[in-house]
Amino acid sequence: MGKFLESITDVTREFIAKQHMFFVATAPLTSEGHINLSPKGLDAFRILSPTKVAYMDLIGSGNETAAHILENKRITFMFCSYDKVPNILRLYGKGYSVTREDAEWGEFSAHFNIYPSTRQIIVADIFMIQNSCGYGIPFYEYQGERHIHFDWAEKKGEQGLEDYKQEKNRVSLDGLATGL
């Protein structure tokens, strides 16, 4: 049985800082809707306080997270240890998207190295944390970050990225608006 916390402790903060990858899960309210689970990498996650986190979201082929949190705010982050000490950490929260057009952009973007392909910053107020064993998680060795996204974004250019967002990121798989 996992352990539950109400806020991020020094131990959980240290664990998160060591992870090179995390997962984001959201879902629409309708039972027929698609559950979204996205892996995230790079140096994109920040702990802003014991109960507030944020991650920098890059332009991609869809924008399910933004659509789901616009509809119902539910969001879960998961971090897994792939090294010697097994562990799974989940952060449960209520999230929202901050874009370059929002008044809060300056406050949150200051925590990140913003790229031309940064689509938004997802911010979440955390209300519960679950820490569990992770005994079934295999070992993996971190070898580095991929640069494919940045090469793609550079080829697209500023207008190409904006056109791509308008074409691919305005509506979710279930037809929900993303707020872009």
Image: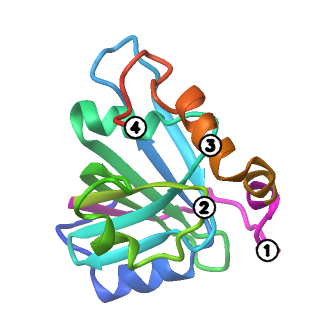
The vertical placement of 80 against 176, above or below, is below
Q: Are marks 2 and 3 in contact (CB under 8 Å)?
A: no
Q: Is residue 103 left or right of residue 97?
A: left
Q: Which of the two residues, 104 or 144, is positioned nearer the viewer here?
A: 104
The vertical placement of 156 against 47, above or below, is above
Q: Residues within 10 Å of mark 3 (few under 14, many from 20)?
A: some
Instruction: Provide the residue designation for mark 4.
Output: 180
Which amino acid type is marked by label 3? Gly
Most distant residue in the front direction: 159
Q: Where is residue 52 in the image (x, y as percent from the top left)?
A: 24, 69
Q: Distance between the residues labelled 2 and 1?
A: 21 Å
Q: Earlier in the sequence, mark 3 or mark 4?
A: 3
Which quadrant would residue 167 be assigned to in this image? top right
Dot 4: element? loop
Question: Which portion, as a residue range, is magenta?
Answer: 126-150
Q: Is residue 127 left or right of residue 121?
A: left
Q: Residue 144 carries which label?
A: 1
Q: Distance between the residues labelled 3 and 4?
A: 13 Å
Q: How far apart are marks 1 and 3 (CA)?
A: 20 Å
Q: Distance between the residues labelled 4 and 1?
A: 31 Å
Q: Which mark is residue 60?
A: 3
Q: Residues within 10 Å of mark 2 (few under 14, many from 20)?
A: some
Point out the frontmost of discs 2 and 3. Answer: 2
Instruction: Provide the residue designation for mark 2.
Output: 116
Q: Earlier in the sequence, mark 2 or mark 3?
A: 3
Q: Is residue 59 left or right of residue 28?
A: right
